Amino acid sequence: MPFRRFFGRGNPEPEPRDAAESEHETDNGAPDEDNVAPEHDALLEDVDGAWRRRASDAIPGASSTGSKRPAALYGPDNETGPIHYSRAAGCVIVTPSDETLIDCTMALGSVAIGYADDAVSQRVIHAIAMGNVAGFSHTSEVELAERLCDVIPCAEQVRFLKTGAEAVSAAIRIARTYTGRDRVIASGYFGWHDWSADGEGIPRGARGDTTRVPFDDVDALERAAADAGSDLAAIVLEPVVERLPSEQWLRRARELCDASGAVLVFDEMKTGFRVAPGGYQEICGITPDVATFGKALANGYPVAAVVGHAAVMDAARRTWISSTLASEATALAAALAVLDWHEEADICATLADTGRELRAALDRAIAASGMDGVRTEGVDTMFLLRWQDPLREARFVQEGARAGALFKRGAYNFAAVAHDDDALRKIEAAASSALVAMAERDRDR
């Protein structure tokens, strides 16, 4: 599925830093992936290591994004492996030491087209040139809201924010305002805000009105709803968590909300514009009252949307939900470019096909290596490499990076349109190399 062959567009060409480098660059601006050496030269390793040390000194945890911390990327106590990039195009990322990796994480699923996509970049550049913020909201806020209402089943009105955590918190506040109630039933991951998160620094009472239930556990959902009784404000669910849900799970959530007058909220951060433009609600036929979108909505630019039925969304006017840069124009422009892509081509079908081929490539590598204790599972567009042993998983991710591919440890690998046939071959080769290195190490013990 070459990106240009399918869609007739390429990626912008980053300026080469010197003539020697430009000789090894492909037409998408990234160094030729055929020249990637699987071994880490000590000098190059030190370049990436120097950035890691600087990050550790200047940033708590070495990254402001938890999933990009060294321990999250490569496992606890691991001191090797790059954690920074200097350039990215398509599905290729380039480290400060000029090593290239095919990215299977795609920025935690926030990029579904490809890095530095020309159509998205040109819209963003135009927004910058026109002034990305001002004392008024930009007209693109209205345009994007209208277009989302045309695409998403539950959407009649829209509010914009910047992150998924903000969006889901806003959805819960809207639900509580609309119902005049407090209790929330939650199933899924909703970010770091106090009402749903675990960890130090969270007041004991912050989650007192939130009841957690396991994914797809209808009995637990019914018990929680019975316990909340007439104080139930909302049921908030990630509709897909590692696998598709049973129909009964989502249907029962809808029935419980209808019976109690509570608000049903779908967190479509991962599923929107990936499994379908309108999220999983477009596929399952069960429509929530409110939903949240982000990630692939803007191909990596920071915007999130809270969408829903007008009667419920109107409650946003009676409470306070606001962010200075919520309607910042570059992210809105990126989202409009993404919607153009989805109108031009069946992006989600391409993602499903690409994810299926990516999983098949990894399955072949696993089978050829004879490695036990690992398999691929989940939804093709956002699947997991499931390891029985976390230490071996960490070792695989480390070896994969050395071989030229970035796999996600402990969470989803995401397909992108930019994962063309050549990238798929290189991912399979990197996985095979990593698995063989692990097997050889096992034999040497």
Image: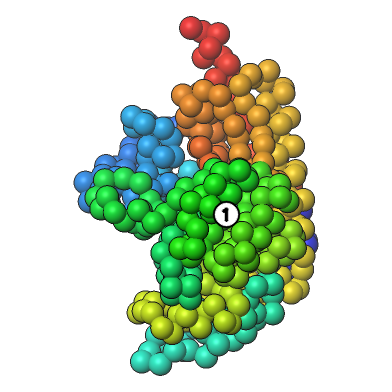
Residue 387's x, y, as percent? 57, 28
Q: What count of labels does the image hold?
A: 1
Q: Would you say residue 222 is visible in this rendering?
A: yes
Q: Quadrant of residue 215?
A: top right
Q: Name which residue lies at 43% across and 68% down.
A: 181
Callout 1 amino acid: Glu
Please give left or right for residue 243 compared with residue 194 in the image. Answer: right
Q: Name which residue lies at 35% across and 46% down.
A: 198
Identify whether 391 is placed above or below 196: above
Q: Quadrant of residue 312?
A: bottom right
Residue 326's x, y, as percent? 42, 77
Q: Would you say residue 399 is visible in this rendering?
A: no
Provide the secondary structure element on which disc 1 rests: loop
Q: Which residue is mark 1?
A: 238
Of residues 99 and 300, the one nearer the viewer is: 300
Of residues 93 and 337, the one nearer the viewer is: 337
Of residues 340 and 115, the one nearer the viewer is: 340
Residue 110's x, y, as percent? 54, 59
Label 1: how many Cα within 10 Å (few below 14, some 14–19, many 20+): many
Q: Name which residue lies at 26% across and 45% down.
A: 200
Residue 427's x, y, as percent? 64, 39
Q: Name which residue lies at 25% across and 53% down.
A: 203
Of residues 119 and 253, the one nearer the viewer is: 253
Identify whether 316 is placed above or below 208: below
